[in-house]
Amino acid sequence: MNSLVAIAYVPDTESKIKVGPDGSSIDESDVKWIVSPYDEYGLEEALKIRESKGAGTVTVVSVGPERVKTGLRECLARGADDAVWVDTGETKNLDALGVSKALAAVAKAATFDFFWFGQKGVGPDESLVGPMTAELLGLPHVANVVHLDVGEGKVTASREIEGAHEIVECSLPAILTAQKGLNEPRYASLKGIMGAKKKPIAEKKLADLDVPEADPAAAKARWRKLSLPAPRQAVKLIPADDPAAAAKELVRLLREEAKVI
Amino acid sequence: MATDRADYLDCDSLFTEEQRLVRDTVGTWVDEKVLPIIEDAAYEGRFPKELIPDMSAMQLFGSTISEYGLPGLDNVAYGLIMQELERGDSGLRSFVSVQSSLVMYPIYAFGSQAQKDNWIPRLGTASAIGCFGLTEPDFGSNPGGMRTTARKDGDSFLLNGAKAWITSGSIADVAVVWAKLDGTIRGFLVEKGTKGFSTFEHKGKMSLRASVTSQLAFEDCRIPAENILPGVEGLKGPLSCLTQARYGIAWGAIGSAMATYGAALDYAKSRKQWKDRPIAAHQLVQERLAWMVTEITKGQLLSWKLGSMKNAGTMKPHHVSMAKRNNVWVARECAKLARETLGANGVVNEYPVFRHLANIESVYTYEGTHDIHTLVIGEAVTGIPAYNPPEE
């Protein structure tokens, strides 16, 4: 069974984000980039399916500038067979629909049973690209998958919903978005890392795919302004020598200063 | 907490994409799996063998060997692994160093085909653990004085003597033991459970507490004649292994220094004393931090240069002495300065500083003491050995 896995290469979740001079993008100078953690669950599940079936391929796909190749290489080191890089060239901040159209174009040229996404790309946190790609391809889509049973031509997926799990059956090929809990992603082996360089990364240009959103003027969504959250206030410690007085003071502060009660 | 490798001069750019990926893979594993458990393991004096399956899956053992399905890493990538492991704990790095450089290396370099076929695959997955017996209770810096002997007796050898300070000694399935056969130092493979071979753990160790350190005793220990390492005679056998291990320690020590520097920097920035200003605002604290980051940077460059020479085949043992001597000293000084910066918090295991401080004392002494490496460099530049030169 063949899998495609979409990979977003995003700022490390520990990065201190700074707003760039244009006020509408992030300053990328000191950013460390990582494979989006939810995408790692998708990749791991694709690798596990290939291993359990003893056949098939896992292809990782990423849309972005040159640096995303490093992320693809990391996925190849973990066990993906090959990769597709859609070079966004001069286009910055491609919107979710643009990314989805690029990924759909790659998928149309491939034969696959699964197309995996993270349930969201860490950073923008939009959860749009998986479902949009499913619509563009006219394929069934299950979001927030935390468990998967693979049958003949179909899958049974357990997905997380508010306060419960929903069991969904769908035909293949399908688009699945991975949620934390689906599996525990493996570490690359050293031999995998050494072999990654020999695995192919096919290169496509965004400009050659049918993606009008590549032109910022045609994008459906644009980043207008970015601002950082207000710095956290210093913690106020209430001495607890007298619990009754401390409770009284806490209530007073919550009412008069924080104005939450 | 994101990994801070004190990369002041963009040393990152010296490494290839592959080398960085090796470092980041092992580094992420250290952050996720080692750091959460290592303080308790060290406090309890317990080797965390639950980490072995991950290390085996990542292929951290014998990683520079390319036969037997092993990864065949270059020496800089190998060094970066040692750096990351020791950023976790010197004991953990010691375990991997010994398995790779002191057990797999001599078997691979000096062993018979049968010995290699038997041991390298098992040691490579750590389904067998190895140890290296050179140092004796009475002979450390002068290993040529060793008293352990081997005597040929029919189709076997009889070993007699004792070894001390042996990393992984009591948990090892095979020991690479150096002993004098008719006055010449030779290597022998002794399997766990062989009659006349016993091990005892060193008790009361205040350093490398997450690593096993043992004495080995041989009392008419009879091993098959084919267990001798055929490929090397004399002190150059064990010394060539030590060159490999010391090379890794030069990198590892930088990892220890990164850990203590990182802890000191974080602490200094968050600890407030006067007027809500962090202690990092004080000149005396800044002086310590500036010293640490400068020395770590120099140490990184020294390791990288050494690794480049090892890759090119131009590295000599006296080059390794400079890096081991310098970088372990830097790590020791950084641990001390970090401890001072953390004040009382520097002595409790809520922070990693005291563990590194205690660990690095062993590293300062083992694998050629600081003093002996000083004399090796002295000999290299003057041509005069200041110590009694060992017999070859």
Image (spheres, coloured by chain):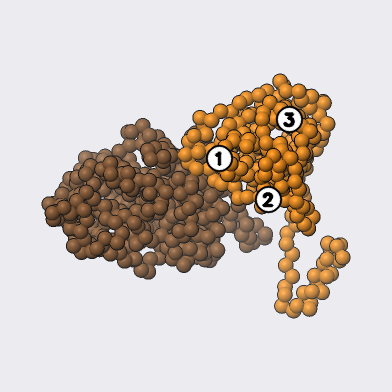
Q: Position of residue B291 (x, y in %)?
A: 48, 49
Along the line of sight, the residue nearer the viewer: B366 or B156? B156
Disc 2 chain ID: A
Q: CA distance from mark 2 to mark 1?
A: 20 Å
Residue with the mark numbered 3:
A104
Left or right of A104 on screen, residue B369: left
Q: Is residue A215 above or below residue B246?
A: above
Picture residue at 62% right of the left edge, 37% below the top? A1
Indicate the position of residue B380 as horizontal and vertical percent values.
26, 40
Q: What number is the disc on residue A147?
A: 2
Kindly indicate whether the residues beneath marks 3 and 1 are on one polypeptide chain: yes
Identity of the residue drawn at 58% across and 44% down = A52
Q: Secondary structure at mark 2?
A: strand
Identified by mark 3, the residue type is Ala
Q: Few, some or many C-alpha atoms within 10 Å of disc 3 (few <14, some 14-19, many ≥20)?
A: many
Closer-to-camera residue (A21/A128): A128
Mark 3 or 2 closer to N-term? 3
Q: Nearer the viewer, mark 3 or mark 2?
A: 2
Tell me the brown chain: B
**Quadrant hosting residue A67:** top right
- Mark 1 secondary-structure assignment: loop
Seen in the image, is B318 located left or right of residue A124? Answer: left
User: Does residue B23 show up?
Assistant: no
- Labels 3 and 2 touching (C-beta < 8 A): no
As drawn, is B48 to the left or to the right of A74?
A: left
Whether the residues at callouts 3 and 1 have beta carbons within 8 Å, the answer is: no
Which badge, 2 or 1, comes first in the chain's sequence?
Answer: 1
